[in-house]
Image: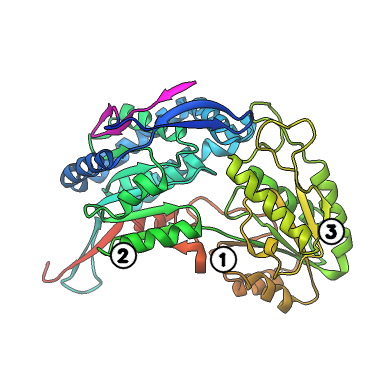
Amino acid sequence: MLNNRKFYINGEWVEPSTKNDFDVINPSDETVCAVISLGSQADTDAAVAAARAALPSWSTSTKADRIALLERLYDIYERRMDDMAEVISMEMGAPIDFSKSSQATAGTFAIEDFLIQLRKFEFEEKLDDSDNQLFYEPKGVCALITPWNWPISQVALKVIPALAAGCTMILKPSELAPLDSIIFAEMLEEAGCPAGVFNLVNGDGAGVGSQLTSHPDIDMVSFTGSTRAGALISHNAADDFKRVGLELGGKGANIIFADADEKAVKRGVRHCFNNTGQSCNAPTRMLVERSIYDQAVEIAKETANSTNVDIASKQGRHMGPVISKLQFDKIQTLIQAGIDENATLVTGGTGKPEGLETGYFVKPTIFADVNNQMTIARTEIFGPVLSIIPFDTEEEAIEIANDTPYGLSNYVQTQDPERARRVSKKLLSGTVEVNGNGAAMGAPFGGYKHSGIGREGGSLGLNEFIEVKVVTGWS
């Protein structure tokens, strides 16, 4: 069991001001794998003060200095990739091979992306044929609050552009999966990040999270998590007009037309079950043209039944547990709601898979004959549960897809390029993925409606941490 009670404040690992231990649970076996501390107001204040004191020097550092820091960080991260993959697998249940190939590598992906953006970014420029000069300056002291489902990915998508922009920051990772952030802090320390520029305080949302979002010396809040929490954070930040960036929930529609390629259904099921369904951009509503609906349901059933479920430490391709008992119980309740509302349970259902009575394991679950007003079609379940909905026309598919408070990611499967473009333009979401083609490096990620405010990744992700100043009469 790991002892990770210290916080990283002002360039040092310090003891918490008060004892408030929290057990980190390994979701594969329900054992305590680490102990952290939950911070108090005194810890939050110390971290904010350190970030505020470091802001004048870091905000005026050169672009070359920031690039050099990120390059050193990249090299250290590459060397410690296995450490990162192992703790993510242990703390949040990602199968170890998946953790190595996708979860841990998301950190280097973000560093590489923002190095590209920073190298070409100009922090001042002339405004057309005028005597006006534009200056792009850091937003200031940032509170970065990250989730457990893609832990280091979300940390890197916030910390790296904040550093690149010249901001200073306090990171509060999820208390359910904090170990990757502790390793990341060690990497930044080794890379020579100046004292106070990056600070780490563990805590929960009601404690350190609320303290940061309402703190008068915080200039910006960047949060990834639930829509409910995002609304609370927005209220907290409103009193002193903090800038707020929110990446929130989703209920993605995967529209499969009759001319889709033969692997479209299987690809959609696997994408839904990826990361045990714990992704805000998961395609959890499969909309299938009626002429191929019965066939699609059978393929989905076969794909789910061939999906292995096992502990995270076991090598190979399989689905791990969900993060916690609370999450497990929520998923069970929603699966039961689907049954109670007369959706057809094709496979899966409530309870744990056979032989996995210990750990937070969920059966890969498929519902058919779902309508878009059912609870399972409207609620972000955040587990391996797929709802299959029939449609007759292109217009009906678009209407169903957009009939949700969310607008993060949607998916289109068709071999008609004109239809793909036509439908994609009408879908209300920040991302539309066509025929399984993933987003490129530098593509911004974020949502419409209740899925958030702002974008992460690429040039727009860097600009989230930038203020713009106009100076007239410059020339």
Asked if residue 58 shows in the view, the reply is yes
81, 11: nearer the viewer: 11
Decide which of tag 3 and tag 2 comes sooner along the chain. 2
454, 209: nearer the viewer: 209
SS majority, magenta: strand
Residue 258 x %, y %: 82, 67
For the C terminus, the image quarter is: bottom left
Decide which of tag 3 and tag 1 comes sooner along the chain. 3
Residue 253 x %, y %: 67, 63
Disc marking residue 296: 3
From the image, state whether disc 3 or disc 1 is nearer to you: 1
Residue 269 x %, y %: 74, 51
Query: What amino acid is found at the position of numbered circle 3 in the picture?
Result: Ala
Q: State how far apart marks 3 and 1 are (Cα).
A: 25 Å
The answer to whether 226 appears left or right of 377 in the picture is left
Residue 233 x %, y %: 38, 58
Disc marking residue 220: none
Decide which of tag 1 and tag 2 comes sooner along the chain. 2
**Residue that badge 2 annotates:** 238
Q: Residues within 10 Å of mark 3 (few under 14, many from 20)?
A: many
Disc marking residue 406: 1
Q: Residues within 10 Å of mark 1 (few under 14, many from 20)?
A: many
Secondary structure at badge 1 equals: loop
Q: State how far apart marks 1 and 2 are (Cα).
A: 22 Å
Secondary structure at badge 3 equals: helix
Query: What amino acid is found at the position of numbered circle 1 in the picture?
Result: Tyr
The answer to whether 76 appears left or right of 1 in the picture is left
Secondary structure at badge 2 equals: helix
State which quadrant residue 251 falls in.
Answer: bottom right
